[in-house]
Image (cartoon, grey):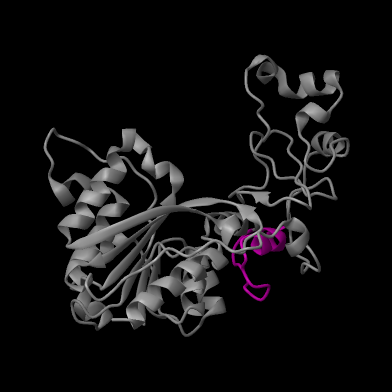
């Protein structure tokens, strides 16, 4: 089963696809650290460190040495960007100037049997729902029948609550032969206790002395409301008088719950992810475990670049479950 992946990042989706039996013809990613990560771990992959806008205008059949319609799967997830509207439904032209436009160009030129497009759940409501609807319209114009679902990584072997919008398209001439189902949730849903055992040592960020002292007073599963009132009020400042629970602030994870979504930065005031047992953020390797990367998968670049690569990735186990269903559908063809 052949695949080409766009916006490949540090390889979460690519690893899941590989595990399910897909052979990567190429992976395209603009971030140098992420492509270094891919090349370090899979020297046999054709990893292209380039702006996709420079590749999509090329003769893609020649560039990838594959005929139109022969590719089994085009995968990836373009960052969410608003489209420009001029009062007319222009199809693909509505998306010009966005990264999604280049994904659609690949789809139009290579005409793979199936495509997999993953994104954040927020894409559904982005720009009043018009952004995603335009994408769906363009997928239809490219001759694909669409199915979509929001999947939570916690249901698929990841100790993390992380929702992704998964859009799968089957080429219209193959819909009578290829039937793809979304994966069924697992019976067991892991928690942090399952993945934080014997984690390899790695670099990790630290909290300031003040924040560390506050976290030392917060129990597992707790947050700022567990502090003495005077300390909580001083830390929250103007947020103290705002409505809502704001449970992400000074949030300490519990070993008996899944992590909240792994972030691209280890220290964000509104969305803390403190280690259950120690007053510190998760390390790179701990975040990688939560994202279900194998321990041997190494990340390149600065510490903060590594945090960003891990945080942006598709959880590997979720990617595998989706890819396994796609492969099953292709094998029935």
Of residue 234 and residue 112, the one placed in the foreground of this image is 112
Q: How many marks?
A: 0
The answer to whether residue 225 of the structure is visible from this angle is: yes
Q: Classify 303 as above or below 113.
A: above
x and y, in percent, of residue 175 in the image:
23, 69
Which contiguous range is marked in magenta?
283-302
The residue at 64%/34% (across/down) is 270
**Image position of 160 (left or right of 180):** right
x and y, in percent, of residue 128 in the image:
32, 33
Q: Classify 10 as above or below 241.
A: below
The residue at 21%/73% (across/down) is 174
Q: Classify 90 as above or below 51.
A: above
The answer to whether residue 97 of the structure is visible from this angle is: no
Placement of the N terminus among the 4 image quadrants: bottom left
**Image position of 310 (left or right of 114):** right
Placement of the C terminus among the 4 image quadrants: bottom left
x and y, in percent, of residue 123 in the image:
39, 44
């Amino acid at each position: 089963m052949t695949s080409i992946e766009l916006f490949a990042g540090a390889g979460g989706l690519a690893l899941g696809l590989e595990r399910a039996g897909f052979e990567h013809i190429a992976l395209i990613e603009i971030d140098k650290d992420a492509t270094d990560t891919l090349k370090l771990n899979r020297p046999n992959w054709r990893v292209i460190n380039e702006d996709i806008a420079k590749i999509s205008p090329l003769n893609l059949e020649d560039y990838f040495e594959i005929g139109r319609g022969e590719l089994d799967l085009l995968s990836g997830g373009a960052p969410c960007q608003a489209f420009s509207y001029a009062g007319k439904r222009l199809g693909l032209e509505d998306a010009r100037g966005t990264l999604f436009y280049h994904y659609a160009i690949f789809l139009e030129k290579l005409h793979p049997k199936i495509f997999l497009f993953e994104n954040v759940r927020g894409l559904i409501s982005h720009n009043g729902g018009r952004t995603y609807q335009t994408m769906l319209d363009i997928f239809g114009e490219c001759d694909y029948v669409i199915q979509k679902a929001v999947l939570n990584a916690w249901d698929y072997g990841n100790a993390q609550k992380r929702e992704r919008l998964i859009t799968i398209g089957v080429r219209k001439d193959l819909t009578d032969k290829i039937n793809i189902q979304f994966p069924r949730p697992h019976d067991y849903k892991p928690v942090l206790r399952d993945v934080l055992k014997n984690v390899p040592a790695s670099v990790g960020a630290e909290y300031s002395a003040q924040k560390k002292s506050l976290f030392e007073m917060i129990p597992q599963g707790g947050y700022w409301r567990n502090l003495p009132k005077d300390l909580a009020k001083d830390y929250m400042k103007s947020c103290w008088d705002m409505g809502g629970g704001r449970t992400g602030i000074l949030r300490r994870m519990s070993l008996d719950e899944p992590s909240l979504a792994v972030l691209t930065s280890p220290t964000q005031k509104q969305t803390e992810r403190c280690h259950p047992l120690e007053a510190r953020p998760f390390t790179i390797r701990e975040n990688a475990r939560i994202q279900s990367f194998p321990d041997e998968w190494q990340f390149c670049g600065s510490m903060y670049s590594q945090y960003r690569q891990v945080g942006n990735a598709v959880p590997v186990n979720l990617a595998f479950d989706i890819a396994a269903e796609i492969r099953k559908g292709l094998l029935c063809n």
